[in-house]
Amino acid sequence: MALTKNDVYKVATLARIEISDEQAEETLGQLNKVFALIEEMQTVDTTDIEPMAHAQDISTRLRDDVVTEKDEHEALQSNAPSVERALFLVPKVIE
């Protein structure tokens, strides 16, 4: 998929970037190289390759999910100017 200079100008307009003719030519060359690399990578046969979640085959040790803090919900909300159904109420910002 080869891009044109008009495509570069459209993207620049959408991104609200002012671009000169020289910059558009340079960007066009760079983007076409990227798309050529993507097309080349899509030709690789990956049918017997398992998906990876991480680049290295490691596992992280996880701690048990237990509550370590005591419930101070009511004490913390006792200073609040306005509370309803255990939620802090704040003034409306957007009308």
Image: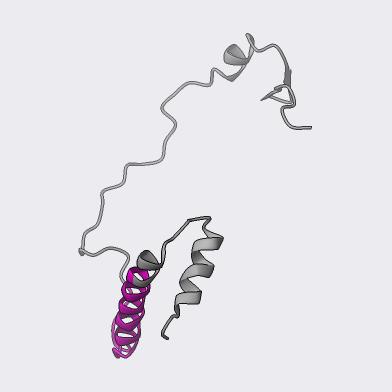
At which x and y percent is residue 38? 34, 80
In which quadrant of the rendered view does residue 93 lie? top right
At which x and y percent is residue 36? 32, 83
Query: Where is 22 relative to 86, above or below?
Result: below
Q: What span is in magenta?
A: 26-51
* Residue beneath the point at 54% across and 17% down: 72
Front position in the image: 74 or 35: 35
Q: In which quarter of the image is the C terminus?
A: top right
Left or right, 52 with reference to 57:
right
At which x and y percent is residue 9? 50, 68
Residue 53 lies in the magenta stretch: no
Query: Where is 34 relative to 14, above or below?
Result: below
At which x and y percent is residue 30? 31, 72
Counting the numbered discs, the total is: 0
* Residue beneath the point at 24% across and 57% down: 59
Q: Quadrant of the N terminus?
A: bottom left
Report the residue that reaches farthest toward the front.
21
Magenta span: predominant SS is helix
Residue 27 lies in the magenta stretch: yes
* Residue beneath the point at 64% across and 10% down: 78
Query: Where is 8 relative to 90, above or below?
Result: below
